[in-house]
Image (spheres, rainbow, N blue to C red):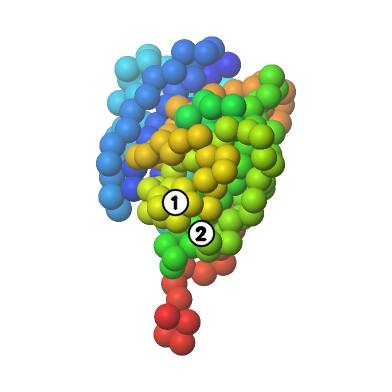
């Protein structure tokens, strides 16, 4: 199974090539230059691997939540590549990719959603992958849902970086530690996508879509 995965959901731009369990990775702190950086990175990765796009088995992308523009870039590029090669596509939750990046048994993932809010989800690792304990939501950090007790949860993501003190206090009873500086990466997206594509769970490129969760990108004047 050969999969090309990409993520542009944050200020980082990352690519990963899954080659039957081995992974090649490239990443750069792109800021707002994902579009101009991504395709040259892709060409360099394919040249390094000696593969053509037609030799791949599918594509994966960070579907969200995250930057609205970034999610559209990743989805659009994957759709174009998949249309050109007639290959399946699969979108992977950026919050689940965060959990995969940490690799602890119980993970709370939170991304800074701006406007004082966070994108939040919680997962428990099983033999078959990640079990969703709290599905991805958008909320104020002070309104995060409580989770089952008796577990040592690890927090990660820019939401925990931005609201470290508040979230540490709210989860003080069952928060084991907070991993700072974590962000979604194409490497974890590839690892999560591989078993799904192997099971034939990929979709046609025209069906691929970002998962925004939020339906607006800024507060109105009377909401500030």
Which residue lies most toward the front here? 173
Earlier residue among tags 1 and 2: 2
Q: Are marks 1 and 2 in contact (CB under 8 Å)?
A: yes
**Where's residue 50, x and y in %?**
37, 14
Left or right of residue 127: residue 46? left
Say which quarter of the image contains residue 138: bottom right
Crowding at dot 2, Cα within 10 Å, few <14 / some 14-19 / many 20+, comes out as many
Left or right of residue 223: residue 151? right
**Where's residue 68, x and y in %?**
46, 58
**The disc label shown at residue 80, or none:** none
Eye-nearest disc, 1 or 2: 2
Point out the image quarter for the C terminus: bottom left
Say which quarter of the image contains residue 148: top right
> SS at mark 1?
helix
How many marks do you count on the picture? 2
Left or right of residue 36: residue 64? right
**Where's residue 194, x and y in %?**
59, 23
**Where's residue 92, x and y in %?**
58, 38
Q: Residue at x 37, y 15 (%)?
A: 49
**Distance between mark 1 and mark 2 Cα atoms:** 8 Å
Q: Residue at x 37, y 35 (%)?
A: 14
Q: Is residue 54 visible?
A: no
Q: Residue at x 34, y 48 (%)?
A: 11
Taking depth in this image into account, of 107 and 99 the one nearest to the observer is: 107
Residue linked to disc 1 = 159
Q: Is residue 181 visible?
A: yes
**The disc label shown at residue 141, or none:** 2
């Amino acid at each position: 199974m050969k999969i090309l995965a990409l993520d542009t959901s944050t200020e980082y731009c990352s690519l990963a090539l899954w080659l039957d369990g081995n992974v090649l990775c490239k990443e750069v702190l792109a800021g707002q230059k994902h579009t101009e950086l991504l395709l040259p990175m892709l060409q360099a990765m394919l040249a390094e691997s000696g593969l053509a796009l037609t030799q791949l088995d599918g594509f994966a992308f960070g579907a969200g939540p995250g930057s609205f523009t970034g999610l559209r870039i990743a989805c659009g590029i994957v759709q174009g590549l998949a249309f050109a090669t007639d290959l399946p596509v699969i979108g992977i939750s950026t919050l689940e990719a965060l959990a995969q990046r940490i690799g602890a048994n119980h993970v709370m993932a939170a991304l800074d959603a701006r406007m004082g809010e966070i994108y939040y989800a919680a997962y428990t690792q099983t033999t078959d992958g990640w079990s969703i304990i709290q599905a991805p939501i958008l909320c104020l950090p002070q309104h995060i849902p409580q989770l089952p007790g008796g577990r040592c949860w690890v927090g990660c993501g820019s939401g925990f970086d931005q609201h470290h003190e508040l979230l540490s206090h709210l989860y003080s009873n069952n928060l084991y530690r907070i991993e700072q500086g974590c962000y979604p990466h194409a490497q974890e997206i590839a690892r999560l996508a591989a078993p799904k594509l192997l099971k034939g769970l990929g979709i046609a490129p025209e069906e691929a879509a970002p998962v925004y969760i939020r339906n607006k990108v800024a507060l109105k004047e009377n909401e500030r």
